[in-house]
Amino acid sequence: MSLVSVDEDTVQRGFSYEWASGAIIPVTAVVLALIIGALIVRVSGSDPWNAYSQLFNGAFGSAYNISETLVAAIPLILAGLSVAFAFRAGLFNIGAQGQILIAALLSAWVGYSLNLPGVILIPLALIAGILGGAAAAGLAGLLKAWRGAHEVITTIMMNYIALYLSQYLLESTPLGTPGPMQQHAQPGFPGTPPLNASLPIIVPSSWVANGRLHAGLIIALVAALLFWFILWRTTLGYKIRAVGLNPKAAAYGGINVGWNIVLAMLIAGAFAGLAAGVSLFGTEHQLTDTFLPTAGFDAIAVALLGRNTAPGVILGAILFGAFEHGGALMQSSAGISSHLIEILQGLIIFFIGADALVRYLARHGVIHLPRLQRKEAVA
Amino acid sequence: MNWLINSGVWTTLINADLWQSTLRESTLLALPAIGGVIAERSGVVNIAMEGMILTGCFISVFISIHAHNAAAGLLAAIALGGAMAAVLAFAAVRLKANQIIVGVAINLVALGLTSYLNVAVWGQNGAPASCAPSGGACKSGQILTIPDWSVWQLNKIPGVGQIFFQQNPIFYLMLLLVVLAHVFLFRTKIGLRIRAVGEHPRAADTAGINVQALRYLAVILSGMLSGLAGGYLALAVSGTFNDNMTSGAGFIALAAVIFGKWTPFGAFGATLLFGFGLALWHTLQNTTGPVQDYSTLIAALPYVLTIVALAGFVGRATAPAADGIPYDPAEAA
């Protein structure tokens, strides 16, 4: 069963065409979600125009807000690439969140226990995180390939295992026994000691005062390039896409389906693991029990919105980064609960997941989709 | 063995409170798990049970306050769970959308909307105080709860009485539903058809069975049971609404479906095991001893066990053949 439908002509005509045609459903989904969100705000007695203008202002209204939106987008790009890569192999990685947590534990452990200069320490810690994320996802891939265990279920289960493991390691018990990785200097604080290095800030303070935009953005963009390169310029990528489009045909064509499922999950987990390390050394500087609480789940929306393409994931991550940072300001200045953001995310995922609904609405004249209607006329 | 006796684990294990709360936790998990079995037997994975339970929590509290009636709250939770499931079924069955994506979306909307409405309706201080109707007159504006039963005088039997006869009415309803679900799936014509639709929809279709209607029915039943679980959690267990108060119960129920090998009795057995894990975790957190420091890891046990079961180390867990796959009558076989 292929979990993600890809238009056949999309595959044949390749990369650039794909984004142009693929943008219609995501944009429609975002617009529909914003309309329903506005209705919810209106019904609950607030002004939707005020809510959205504060949201936009909070996300893009100043150089600082733009830089914070990008800061929030960094882990979402990497986690989004993780989910998107798995989708390309026909696998649904709901476990990016768990992979992020496992990776964060390993990255942070390297980061606070080794006293080395940053140029050595940060790569080491990032690699530790990549390996951790890859191992966590790879296990799900292995169980799928070897025992037929559905990756959706195993990765959901591993999210919870990772959550409780990190709570055990980072938090004190209710009776005060500190967790094994907990910082002892600050009793009761649910976090590790501070890391021994940080990623450099890439925006000069003359542009953005107190800006936090760090080199993780460059790492994320390079990762996006790597994502594209692996998928579209290597034999491995070809095999993984073939497995995703039609595992039976791929197997008939001599591709080892099981092995490529494992490889796809390993690579997907590596992207998620990098998301953890980059955020740790870029913005957090220590691992706490509130580290990236939803990035792995937001990543599902980012990947779907980005149609599992590298540029799409980047744009989707910026949109969700804007939601995250702008939503906080919307709550404080317009008094609208930032839970509205979760509603919008859910609706966007719904409309993309049920893209047939969008086509159904278009067919019945509820909304207007010029391109899709032309396609049907040809058929 | 000395450390085990000294650790306080033993006194925890022989405490009737632990076993009473095991059955409480199991009730919350078993209701959606039975529904999950029915839905998956028909070929639809209901990953949105978590969101349906959470929405059931919210609406049951809301209606319990405004109708001044706990039973009305419970019925509203069942109805809304069914309605949400109808949306999932429409997307999964009619539109042939990806069930997992739509399920994830429903969970997210449910989490966001209930948290949003929690503040919008009740303000920063949250839902109002609760009141057990049997404990005297309740003022209007309070949450009416569903109090536990003390069954005849049986709850006075030492130990066993507290565990089995000092429980919520919904616990006994759940036991009944487990049996009914088994009879429904394995002893009725419609149950046989649901299983046929989940194993081989094309064959069922050829035999004149309405695949889509049965999948709608099964998914809506699972939504109603999830809604009931939400009403139970809010009105019978906690007596209030909190953001994300289900904290993964729907996913543990999903795990129980698999661990129980897609049968109602199996799923119920799994929820007993998982419920025991949860009860043990909560109990150990508040006692002292060497084992207690690891109590958080006990919370991860249901999830570890499910992966082990899926990996086939505890007998093979095989899903219905068409589980999760939309059926398209027009598609060539």
Image (cartoon, coloured by chain):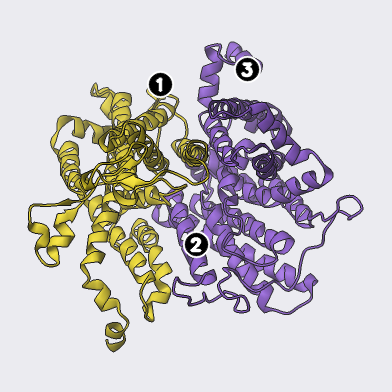
Circle 1 residue:
B330
In which chain is the residue bearing label 1?
B
In the image, which is nearer the foreground, mark 2 or mark 1? 2
> Which quadrant: the C terminus of chain B?
top left
Q: x%, y% of residue A295?
A: 60, 50
Q: CA distance from mark 3 to mark 2?
A: 43 Å
- Residue behind mark 2: A162
Q: Is residue A239 visible?
A: no
In this rendering, the answer to whether A85 lies above or below B296 is: above
When asked about the image quadrant of residue B73, the answer is: top left
Residue type at numbered disc 3: Leu
Q: CA distance from mark 1 to mark 3?
A: 25 Å
Q: Chain B hue? A: yellow
Residue wearing tag 3: A369
Q: Amino acid at mark 1?
A: Ala
Q: Residue at x 69, y 34 (%)?
A: A14
